[in-house]
Structures are given as structure tokens and as C-alpha cells.
Image (cartoon, rainbow, N blue to C red):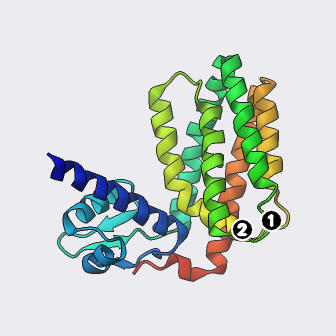
Amino acid sequence: MNQIVQSKTLAARAYQDIRRDIVDGVLPAGSKLRMEALSKRYDVGLTPLREALARLVGDSMVVTEGQRGFWVAPLSIEELEDISNVRSLIETEALTRSIERGDDEWEQQLTAAFEDLTRIETGLGGNPSDEQMHDWEAVNRRFHEILVSACGSPWLIKLRDTMYRQAERYRHISLMTSHEDRCLHDEHEGIYHAAVNRQTLKAARLTELHLNRTAEAVAAALRENRELLKSG
């Protein structure tokens, strides 16, 4: 039993490490994932490594073709647009229900998350480090999770979380690309104030614009750097 638990722990660690390197672009889109190299890189055996890769296939972060092996899933502008459109539909519906149902505790949690996000975003600058990016991603995820947390639908939450994870690789590209005309904090601040003031339609519209601007920024970055779109 201890060996099974240890294998599951190693698989979970490998999953997190590989996923992070895919999101960060350390393992580029379309690149072949060679088992022996991965085993050495992440200091993990082949059995938990295969389990980790299977989870990443389920997340659409990795693709496989029969017995030919594993590759990092490619990026595409078409997929970006599809993810953005579906996420916008789910996110705004969940947000609308959450604002209507949210109580004082929800509002307090949202305020605390926004304050944490403010501290991070005011220190990002134009060229954030990987460490700053990871810190930002954590607090940004928390802020958006709390926004929809009172929607009252476990399935909406699950679908919303799935789309959030699918967008993560693309969102990283957006944040690592300088766009002087965009202030993420202003966008988050607008959504926050609309939510706590129970301005449901405004909050949903600002969220839709927020997601669309991110998708547009990523699409522009992908067009400028076609290397990111390599599929193998």
C-alpha cells in the first residue's frame, strides 16, 4: 500500500511540474515528450510519469498517438477563440448567478481576494519575472473563483474551472507580452466594484470584455511569433 501511495504522490508531483513547464513555455507547444529525458528531468520513475502524462492528456495539455508517444499539445488561434467564447458564456452566467445569490461572507471574501490581487498587480511592471507570474496567477485564480463561488451550481463551477485551466497557457502568453494600452488592474477593479455593488449586467459585460481583451492580446502575440504555433 505504501508503494501505491508513494507512486501516486510522485505522479501528482510530476503532473504539477510538467504542467507548470508547459504553461510557462519551458516545454514548447508541439515538442516531443521523451520518457527517458522526462524521467531524468523530473526525477520520477516511468510508471508515475505515465500516470502524470495521462492526466495531462485528459487536461488537453498533452496529446498522444497510439504507441508513438506523447507531445505537448499545439497552440492555435482557432482553439484560443473557441476557448475564449465558451469560457465567456460560462463565466458570465456563473457570475450573474453568484452576484444575485452572494451574501455578506461572499462579499468579504471577494474584497479580501481583490486586495491581494491589487498588491500583486501594482508591483508587476512591464516585464514580470516567472516568480511574479506564478504569484499573480495564484491570486488571480482566487479572485475569479470567488467571483463565481456563490452561483449555487456545482456543474457550472466545474465547467468554469475546466475552461479556466484550458485558457492558462494562452493567458501566460498575454501577460508576458507588453501591451502599454492595457491595465489589468483597472479591468479587475471595474469587475470587483460592479460585483459588490450588485450591478449584475455591468459586471458580466466587464468580464466579457476582460476575457476578450486577453484573447485579442494572445492572438496578436501568436501572429507576431509564429514559433509559438509549432505543432511538431
> Which quarter of the figure has residue 35?
bottom left
Observer able to see residue 82: no
Q: Amino acid at mark 2?
A: Pro
Q: Which residue is mark 1?
A: 125
CB atoms at circles 2 and 1 under 8 Å apart? yes
Give the residue furthest to the left: 1
Q: Residue at x 72, y 24 (%)?
A: 107
Position of residue 193 in the picture relative to residue 162 (left or right):
right
> Which quarter of the figure has residue 10?
bottom left
Spatial separation of the CA atoms under disc 2 and disc 1: 6 Å
Q: Secondary structure at mark 2?
A: loop
Q: Position of residue 67 (x, y in %)?
A: 17, 72
Front residue of this view, candidates 135 and 150: 135
The crowd level at tag 1 (other Cα within 10 Å; few <14, some 14-19, many 20+) is: few
Vertical relation: 131 (above or below) 186:
below
Q: Position of residue 99 (x, y in %)?
A: 68, 24
Position of residue 171 in the picture relative to residue 191 (left or right):
left
Q: Position of residue 199 (x, y in %)?
A: 79, 26
